[in-house]
Each structure stands twice: as structure tokens, then as C-alpha cells.
Image: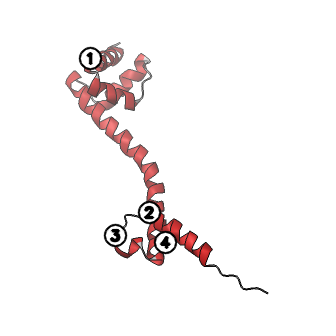
């Protein structure tokens, strides 16, 4: 039986890991054992944080909305309740963006929400 040399496949595999570990500090970027572990852990963090990013942004939008409706004499939860009663179906991302970039439009929405609570 002929001998199989596996240097080419090993090198290709290692190259893939090194490419993913580019920019890492110390031996984590150029030693296969350390790089493999670091890349695997980085993948775990990336997977986890793709989910966490959605929560973080939603929390940010809520904080912005809470701050934006305070001058109108409401809290965030009262504002959201008013929106649902008035039948305005706008998500928090868009509302937050309106509060920052289009204050007049946001004020109109806030007034409608407040009116729906009073009725």
C-alpha cells in the first residue's frame, strides 16, 4: 500500500483557523492549538451575542422613548398603553427614531396616545 502524506490537507485546515484568528493577541493568532481554542470560543461569543444584540437594542429604544415622553407628562408604560388604545401600530425602533429625528411627528403621536387614555 502506498504512503499517504497529509501535509497539504492539514495546512489547508490550519490556514482556515489562522484566517479566523487574524488580529488575535499573542500565540492565539499563530499557534494552532491556541488559535483553535480561541476561534471556537469567539464563535460561541458571536452566537450568543447575536441573540443578545436584539435585547440590547430593544432596551435602548425603550429608554429613549421613556425619556422622550416624559416632557408630555407620561411614562413609557403609560405611553405604550395609550398607543395600543388609540390603535397606533408603530414599533419601538421607529418610535425611537421619530423621537430623535422628527420631534414634531413624535409629539403628534404622543398627543394621540394621551388623548386615547383620557377617553
Tag of residue 25: 3
Real-space CA distance between mark 2 and mark 3, rounded to the nearest whole angstrom = 13 Å
Per the image, the residue denoted by label 2 is 42
Tally of numbered tags: 4
Residue furthest to the right: 1
Question: Which residue corresponds to the image point at 32% horizontal and 40% vertical from the top-left?
Answer: 60
Per the image, the residue denoted by label 1 is 104
Q: Nearer the viewer, mark 1 or mark 4?
A: 4
Real-space CA distance between mark 4 and mark 3, rounded to the nearest whole angstrom = 13 Å
**Foreground of the two, 98 or 37:** 37
Tell which circle, 2 or 3, labels the residue nearer the N-terminal end. Answer: 3
Mark 3 lies on a secondary structure that is loop
Answer left or right for 66 relative to 18: left
Q: Nearer the viewer, mark 1 or mark 2?
A: 2
Per the image, the residue denoted by label 4 is 36
Real-space CA distance between mark 1 and mark 2, rounded to the nearest whole angstrom = 44 Å
Answer left or right for 22 relative to 110: right
Q: Residues within 10 Å of mark 4 (few under 14, many from 20)?
A: many
Real-space CA distance between mark 3 and mark 1, rounded to the nearest whole angstrom = 49 Å
Q: Quadrant of residue 102?
A: top left
Q: Position of residue 94 (x, y in %)?
A: 38, 28
Answer left or right for 57 relative to 48: left
Residue furthest to the left: 71
Tell which circle, 4 or 3, labels the residue nearer the N-terminal end. Answer: 3
Amino acid at each position: 500500500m502506498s504512503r499517504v502524506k497529509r501535509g497539504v490537507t492539514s495546512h489547508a485546515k490550519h490556514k482556515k483557523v489562522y484566517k479566523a484568528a487574524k488580529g488575535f493577541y499573542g500565540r492565539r493568532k499563530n499557534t494552532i492549538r491556541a488559535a483553535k481554542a480561541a476561534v471556537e470560543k469567539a464563535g460561541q461569543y458571536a452566537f450568543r451575542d447575536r441573540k443578545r444584540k436584539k435585547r440590547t437594542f430593544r432596551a435602548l429604544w425603550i429608554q429613549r422613548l421613556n425619556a422622550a415622553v416624559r416632557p408630555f407628562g407620561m411614562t413609557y408604560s403609560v405611553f405604550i398603553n395609550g398607543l395600543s388604545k388609540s390603535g397606533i401600530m408603530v414599533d419601538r425602533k421607529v418610535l425611537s427614531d421619530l423621537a430623535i429625528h422628527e420631534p414634531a411627528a413624535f409629539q403628534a403621536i404622543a398627543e394621540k396616545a394621551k388623548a386615547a387614555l383620557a377617553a
